[in-house]
Amino acid sequence: MSNPASPPAVDVLDERPGLTFPPGFLWGAATAAYQIEGAAAVDGRTPSIWDTFSHTDGRVLLGHTGDVACDHYHRLGDDVALMAELGLKSYRFSVSWSRVQPGGTGAANPQGLDFYRRLVDELLANGIEPWLTLYHWDLPQPLEDAGGWPARDTAARFADYTTLMADALGDRVRYWTTLNEPWCSAFLGYGSGVHAPGRTNGADAVRAGHHLMLGHGLSVQALRAARPTAEVGVTVNLYPVDPASDTPADADAARRIDALANRFFLDPLLRGSYPEDLVADLSTVTDFAHVQDGDLAIISAPLDQVGVNYYSRHVVAAPVEGGEADPAPSCWPGSEDVRFVTRGVPVTDMGWEIDAPGLVETLRRVHDYTDLPLYVTENGSAFVDTVVDGEVDDVERLAFFDAHLRAAHEAIDAGVPLRGYFAWSLMDNFEWAWGYTKRFGMIHVDYDTQVRIPKSSAKWYASVIRRNGLAAQ
């Protein structure tokens, strides 16, 4: 079994007055089903697109799969005990659709539902608010075989699945997220193909993005019908996008990428329309005939909160005049030749630039769209960790969290209605196409023994939660 070593009882930060967050600020951590659960073929679970993708040669680094992952399915009690020892106020997890509804249609799988009932009950018994995400990228494989997210019917199937989950857990789960990062599902899954299901068609990616949002809207309707008191939202991954220079060409490149990365989702979800410039940019890819009358009204159904996942900033430049186009499939349909520029600033082990001020910009931008409560539903960093004498001193990750929480506090001071923060991730896990080669966790996982070791960042985060704030710098 796991080894839930306890964080120290003493604070690891100076107790001098620092930054205090508002009363009731929701401190949490997040995970995703396929990344941690394992038990891929246990108790009636059937394959998702990530099972198929990871078992396809060449798709995931070193041939890694999520078959076992962190074995959370069998270690639920120990893992929730770790959360309680950290003092988490909330835990954001996702449901494996094919675990609770094999094949993506039809009756519920009682054993799959029982796992999530046990999880929710264990969380509540430890004073931890469950935050349930319905979709974190693991579409049941039969629905992909029937067309996947580019097919309109998948949105309807998602609404059916939502009703199933609301009936099963709605009496105990208050917070619901429909989708996690639909940009990744659509543009990495169906555009560049670096994520499951691995398809590479720009028009499919755009259709997938729309049908994901339509599924979100139908899911909101289903939740409202089944559980009128539920707090319902969606999580989008957003990036500040800057031009590499002040030239008009670079400014237009930034506009194009901003449209695809951010406004493709923010505008339909929160304004009920697609940006006109985005539609024009995509005119060589699709005619948007997949958007039917009434879709945007469904997509923009009123919400109770918006989740923001933030990791980095994009800096882009115009295409090189006369340069040859990159033949590789792209996650930027219609703007494949825009160049992404590095600035020589510190990066994480993913190669992502560390840019805490970008979190302030991102939160303020979403607040320009809506007065709804906002939550940072993911924020974190991968670094190379080393176990020394049973400890992991991840000073770079701790510094990353500290800088971004100070940015979150700055956003609150600027009037952003930020109500909570979820660190990504609770524990090291299967990092999608990178397999087990990248570690984001506050808790180290030895994948051979499944021993868990809270890192320095976990102990630090526990102290932040206890004081509801940050120490003086």
Image: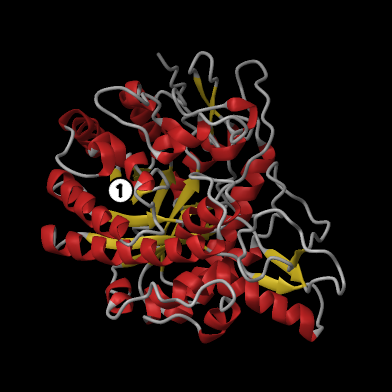
- Left or right of residue 440, residue 211 in this image: left
Looking at the rendered structure, the number of numbered marks drawn on it comes to 1
453 above or below 428? above
What residue is at 48 percent from the left and 61 percent from the top?
A: 204
What residue is at 71 percent from the left and 81 percent from the top?
A: 252
- Left or right of residue 202, residue 6 in this image: left
Between 431 and 364, which is closer to the camera in this rendering? Answer: 431
Residue located farthest toward the right when viewing the structure as drawn? 322
- Left or right of residue 228, residue 102 in this image: right
At which x and y percent is residue 287?
Answer: 48, 77
Between 425 and 66, which is closer to the camera in this rendering? Answer: 66
- Left or right of residue 201, residue 101 in this image: left
Give the labeled residue for mark 1.
132
200 above or below 196? below
Between 464 and 184, which is closer to the camera in this rendering? Answer: 184
310 above or below 53? below
Which of the image's four quarters has the C terminus? bottom right
- From this viewpoint, is residue 411 visible? yes
At which x and y percent is residue 425?
Answer: 50, 41
Image quadrant assignment for residue 350: top right
What residue is at 48 percent from the left and 45 percent from the top?
A: 197
Between 63 and 405, which is closer to the camera in this rendering? Answer: 63
At which x and y percent is residue 202?
Answer: 56, 62
Q: Secondary structure at mark 1?
A: strand
At which x and y percent is residue 42?
Answer: 30, 22
What residue is at 64 percent from the left and 49 percent from the top?
A: 400
- From this viewpoint, is residue 429 visible? no
Image quadrant assignment for residue 446: top right
